[in-house]
Image (spheres, grey):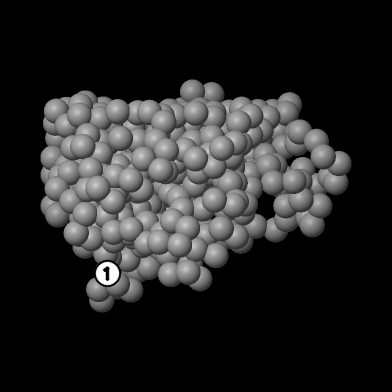
């Protein structure tokens, strides 16, 4: 079977691609996160002279790389993160995918990579999900995780802007990112994730390598992730692991305002828009860790949650800070967290109507 679709100047070739039956999971607990992949992938190549070319959907396959390949040594690699959601009647939805590819272009600009065509990439994802549609799992809360990525593939050892790049999209049926239950977060005061003028606002591979040590130390203390503080004063809250972070303080939703050290999450943006729609007061501002700890002690900070595509909205039950552990509310997800999660998931899974343009149907 061979099929081509013209999108702008680029042709999408679909070669050796036949729909294949989905996996046979007995229950959602078997799915895990990001270990099983669908049978097809998308790939395209970039050359300084030719632009993007050879766009094709092909069977999933390993990549053969020269050991001198640029990104392996110097980290020129970026990625994105989105999901396909299956409604009970079988209909499949994407959630605000254009935001992901616009952000991917922002990441690309930060490290001198070529930009991609947002509309073309959305067409590609629709074709890819349509082909592997039986791999979108059907249990509540399970999804098909979609991972676009791009890296510099020039085999040359000088630190340089690569003349060539490889872009691909792979897909993986996933269950819950953190398993069920609430998170315990450790307030990290030693390592930092991002500095002003650095790459923290882009989804660049190296940012995640740099975060592993702190996450690992937190894990050894019994916490699932860290809360990152600003790199200058170690005082203002930035993010929670690879999630944006929200607090409910005096019945108001509060999240750190965007700077060049905070990743502009699609989930974060959606939560702020939903608060507006539901008349829940919400503010973007600087949030100091001392304000939050004081609020947990005197009961004015009642809810804490992390937000991201993989983790959706993850309630936080405890914060570990210096020598103490602080419980959030009664340790269970609070009413605003639950309401936002319910609304957001309803829109993502196509059972609730969101703002116009948020849901894209795959038919
Ligand atoms: C991806 C990511 C997020 C969440 O972004 P979403 O678009 O909501 O998935 C937050 N922080 C970091 C550091 C991230 O990498």
Q: Residue at x 31, y 55 (%)?
A: 316
| Residue named by callout 1 | 28
Q: Quadrant of the C terminus?
A: top left
Q: Can the viewer see residue 56?
A: no
Residue 362 on image: x %, y %: 28, 42
In the figure, 45 relative to 225: above or below?
above
- How many tags in the picture? 1
Q: Residue at x 29, y 44 (%)?
A: 295
Residue 338 on image: x %, y %: 17, 49
Residue 152 on image: x %, y %: 70, 42
Q: Residue at x 17, y 32 (%)?
A: 280
Along the viewing direction, whichever of 159 and 83 lies nearer the viewer: 159
Query: In this view, which residue lies farthest toward the right?
Result: 158
Q: Residue at x 55, y 65 (%)?
A: 217
Q: Quadrant of residue 237?
A: top left
In the figure, 172 relative to 99: above or below?
below
Along the viewing direction, whichever of 300 and 316 lies nearer the viewer: 300
For label 1, the crowd category at 10 Å Cα-Cα, with few meaning under 14, some 14 to 19 and many 20 or more, is some
Q: Mark 1 falls on what kind of element? A: helix
Q: Quadrant of residue 323?
A: bottom left
Is residue 18 toward the left or the right of residue 29 in the image?
A: right
């Amino acid at each position: 079977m061979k099929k081509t679709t013209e999108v702008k100047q680029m042709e999408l070739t679909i070669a050796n691609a036949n729909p294949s039956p989905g996996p046979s999971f007995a229950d959602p607990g078997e799915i895990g996160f990001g270990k099983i992949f669908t049978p097809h992938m998308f790939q395209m190549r970039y050359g300084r002279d030719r632009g993007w070319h050879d766009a094709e959907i092909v069977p999933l396959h390993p990549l053969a790389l020269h050991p001198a390949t640029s990104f392996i040594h110097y980290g020129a690699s970026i990625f994105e993160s989105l999901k396909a959601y299956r409604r009970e009647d079988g209909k499949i939805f994407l959630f605000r995918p254009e935001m992901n590819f616009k952000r991917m272009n922002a990441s690309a600009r930060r490290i001198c990579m070529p930009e991609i065509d947002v509309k073309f990439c959305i067409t590609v994802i629709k074709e890819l999900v349509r082909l592997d549609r039986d791999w979108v799992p059907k249990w509540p809360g399970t999804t098909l995780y979609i991972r676009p990525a791009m890296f510099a593939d020039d085999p040359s050892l000088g630190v340089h802007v690569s003349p060539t790049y490889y872009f691909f999209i792979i897909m993986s049926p996933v269950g819950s990112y953190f398993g069920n239950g609430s998170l315990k977060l450790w307030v990290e005061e030693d390592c930092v994730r991002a500095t002003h003028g650095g790459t923290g606002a882009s989804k660049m591979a190296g940012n995640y390598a740099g975060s592993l040590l702190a996450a690992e130390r937190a894990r050894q203390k019994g916490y699932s992730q860290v809360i990152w503080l600003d790199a200058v004063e170690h005082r203002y809250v930035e993010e929670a692991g690879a999630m944006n972070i929200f607090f409910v303080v005096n019945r108001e939703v509060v999240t750190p305002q965007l700077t060049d050290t905070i990743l502009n999450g699609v989930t974060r943006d959606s939560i702020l828009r939903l608060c507006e729609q539901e008349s829940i007061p919400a503010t973007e501002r600087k949030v100091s860790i001392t304000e939050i700890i004081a609020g947990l002690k005197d009961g004015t900070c009642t809810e804490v949650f992390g937000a991201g595509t993989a983790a959706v909205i993850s309630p936080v039950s405890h914060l570990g800070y210096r020598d103490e552990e602080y419980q959030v509310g009664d340790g269970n997800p609070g009413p605003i967290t639950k309401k936002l999660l319910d609304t957001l998931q309803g829109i993502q899974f196509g059972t609730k109507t969101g703002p116009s343009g948020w849901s894209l149907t795959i038919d």
